[in-house]
Structure formats: structure tokens, C-alpha cells
Image (spheres, helix red, strand yellow):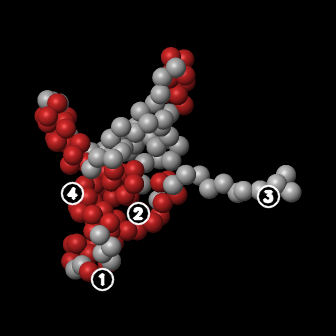
């Protein structure tokens, strides 16, 4: 990210992010000051399934569309889904269920497992999804 920001600054550009809604606001599947350190995030309001639909519409090469999602950090065949423990369609479902106010006790089997994965990651990574907390110092102390 440092290199990207260096070259962006030289050209007075902004750095665009690649995170989708599930990654950025669901499970926090990004590195806070790595791939999450961006100036704008053009697809962060889109579910992964919607990103695929747009890719199809735009005529993106099918090989790219069909490639397994990976963060590319491990140098092996590990996918995002391997690391998370659930597929993107499952995570989209869990995000929707949480938005509807469902709780773990509403589910059984794989649905319960996926909802638990989603809820745990959402809670653990909440610090990545909210603005940096600021300690407001009273004026009389400043």
C-alpha cells in the first residue's frame, strides 16, 4: 500500500479499494492498513454476487470471473472461502439474516454454523469497519 500511495501522490491520484460489501462491512476480510487503507471503495456497497453480475454485463473474461477468490497472501491455493470457512453466497445469506434481526437460535445445521462464522468475524473485525475512535479532550484540559 505504501508503494501505491507513493505513486498515487506523485500523480495526484486516489487509491481505489477492491472490497465488496461482505468483505468490508460483513466479515472484515481485509488488512486494516493494507488493502483496507484506500481513498475510495467503488464496489463496497455491492455484494459479491452483484460484482459477478456486473462483470458478466461488462464482458469480463470468464476465466477471471470463474477464478476462486483469494487474497494472494499465502503463496498456495488457499481461497478466501477456505480461510473464512464459508462461501460468499453463504456469507451474503448470513449478512441478510443479521440485517433482519435473526439470531443463532433461529438456525440449525450448516445455516447455524455459517451464521456463527459470520457473527464471530463481524464482531471481531468491527474495529475495521468503524471510524477511528477519538478521545475528546475537554477544552479546560487542553
Residue 108, position as x, y percentages in the image: 22, 80
Q: Are circles 2 and 3 on residues that touch, CB within 8 Å?
A: no
Secondary structure beneath label 2: helix
Q: Nearer the viewer, mark 2 or mark 3?
A: 3
Contact between marks 2 and 4 (CB within 8 A): the answer is no
Question: In the image, 88: left or right of 21?
Answer: left
The answer to whether residue 117 is visible is: no
CA distance for labels 3 and 1: 44 Å
Q: Position of residue 28 (x, y in %)?
A: 42, 54
Cα separation, mark 1 vs mark 2, equals 18 Å
Of the image marks 3 and 1, the number of the one nearer the N terminus: 1
Q: Nearer the viewer, residue 89 or 21?
A: 21
Q: What residue did someone put label 2 on?
A: 121
Which picture quadrant has residue 101?
bottom left
Say which label, 2 or 3, has the lower sequence index.
2
40 over 45 or under it: above or below: above
Q: Is residue 97 above or below residue 133?
A: below
Residue found 52% across the figure and 28% down from its top: 5
Q: Residue at x 28, y 72 (%)?
A: 113
Q: Which residue is mark 3?
A: 138
Residue carrying label 1: 105
Amino acid at each position: 500500500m505504501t508503494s501505491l500511495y507513493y505513486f498515487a501522490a506523485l500523480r495526484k491520484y486516489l487509491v481505489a479499494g477492491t472490497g465488496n460489501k461482505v468483505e468490508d462491512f460483513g466479515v472484515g476480510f481485509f488488512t486494516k492498513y493494507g488493502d483496507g487503507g484506500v481513498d475510495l471503495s467503488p464496489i463496497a456497497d455491492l455484494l459479491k454476487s452483484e460484482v459477478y453480475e456486473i462483470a458478466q454485463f461488462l464482458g469480463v473474461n470468464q476465466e477471471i470471473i470463474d477464478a476462486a477468490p483469494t487474497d494472494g497472501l499465502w503463496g498456495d491455493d488457499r481461497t478466501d472461502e477456505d480461510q473464512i470457512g464459508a462461501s460468499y453466497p453463504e456469507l451474503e445469506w448470513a449478512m441478510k439474516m443479521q440485517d433482519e434481526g435473526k439470531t443463532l437460535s433461529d438456525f440449525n445445521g450448516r445455516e447455524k454454523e455459517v451464521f456463527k462464522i459470520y457473527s464471530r468475524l463481524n464482531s471481531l473485525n468491527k474495529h475495521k469497519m468503524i471510524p477511528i475512535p477519538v478521545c475528546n479532550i475537554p477544552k479546560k484540559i487542553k
